[in-house]
Image (spheres, rainbow, N blue to C red):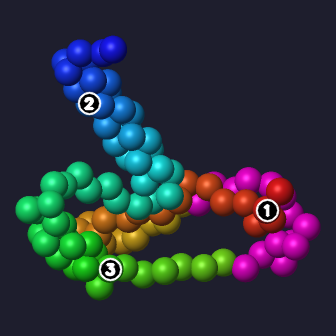
Amino acid sequence: MPSDEEIEFLERNADIKAIDSLKQMSDITAGRFYLSDTPKLRGIFKKVAGELRQQYRLGYYSKEAATDAAVYDINVKVKRTDAVVRARGKFRAKQL
């Protein structure tokens, strides 16, 4: 039977792996990752709500979308120096 210290170590290690996975997922999808405990949730929700009020959504329709299974890079550029751009890095028009 594992000791309390071993259990704590395993739980902490699992938490680190889970956090790393969530960070990687948010990077791939151009999302954001916030780590917070319960007392700080109100502030985190305010940040998220503020970001949602300042977002734009861009779309693109390809003529070959129904048959095109290639992977394309996405590059979004803006002229404003004070803007922060987050976008997925790639997309595939057709799901495999």
Secondary structure of the residue carrying numbered label 1: loop
Say what amino acid the circle numbered 3 marks: Leu
Is the residue 23 above or below the residue 77 in the image?
above
Which image quadrant for residue 51?
bottom left
Q: Position of residue 57 (x, y in %)?
A: 49, 80
Would you say the residues marked 1 and 3 are in contact, meaning their CB atoms lie under 8 Å apart?
Answer: no
Q: Earlier in the sequence, mark 1 or mark 3?
A: 3
Q: Residue furthest right?
A: 67
Q: Which residue is mark 3?
A: 52
Q: Earlier in the sequence, mark 2 or mark 3?
A: 2
Residue at 29 percent across and 85 percent down: it is: 53
Crowd class of label 2 (few under 14; some 14 to 19; many from 20; radius 10 Å): few
Crowd class of label 3 (few under 14; some 14 to 19; many from 20; radius 10 Å): few
Residue at 74 percent across and 53 percent down: it is: 71
Say what amino acid the circle numbered 2 marks: Arg
Q: Which residue is mark 1?
A: 95
